[in-house]
Image: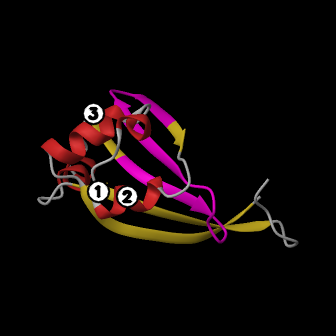
Amino acid sequence: MHACEDASYDVISLYFDTPSYTCVMEKEGGYYNRFKYRLQTYNTGGMYNLELKEKKGSTCLKTIKPLDEGTEFSLIDGAVLPPNKIAGIDNFYSLRRSSLLKPAVVVHYKRTA
């Protein structure tokens, strides 16, 4: 779907975390119940997904929400979104405000299909 001629494609992820880096500390600490949010796109962008990755014991879950054009930049900037833009990302939006989730790290790599 995203692959180029050589069957590879770029994956660009922007991870969100709290000011005290709670998400990364819980991962490194091996917590059985943890979560992380990331904004992800492929190749040169254009389409962005907000992804929630959760670990509950030995179970891993991933929820993907495609974003409307422009919403991704509002999430990065911390802008206040109108109610119609929050639908489907309510939990992220609430955590962003209460836990001060902010852009923390960008990971960019090439994946082979």
For discs 1 and 3, the disc positioned in front in the rendered view:
1
Q: Which residue is mark 1?
A: 79
Q: Which badge, 1 or 2, is on the more N-terminal residue?
A: 2
**Residue at x 46%, y 44% (from the top left corner):** 51
Tell me the SS state at disc 1.
Answer: loop
- Find the distance from the CA under tag 1 to the CA under tag 3: 32 Å
What is the x, y in percent for residue 53?
42, 40
Answer with mark 3 or mark 2, whichever residue precedes in sequence.
3
In the visual, does 16 lie left or right of 46?
left
Label 3 sits on residue: 32
The C terminus lies in which quarter of the figure? bottom right
The residues colored magenta run: 37-63
Question: Given this view, does label 3 or label 2 mark the residue nearer the observer?
Answer: 2
Q: Amino acid at mark 2?
A: Ser
Q: Are marks 1 and 2 in contact (CB under 8 Å)?
A: yes
The residue positioned 23% from the left and 37% from the top of the image is 94
Q: Amino acid at mark 3?
A: Tyr
| Residue wearing tag 2 | 74
As measured in the structure, the alpha-carbon distance from the residue carrying label 3 to the one carrying label 2 is 31 Å
**Residue at 18% across, 54% down:** 18
Per the image, label 2 sits on a secondary structure element best described as helix
Q: Is residue 111 magenta?
A: no
The 10 Å Cα crowd at callout 3, few under 14, some 14 to 19, many 20 or more, is some
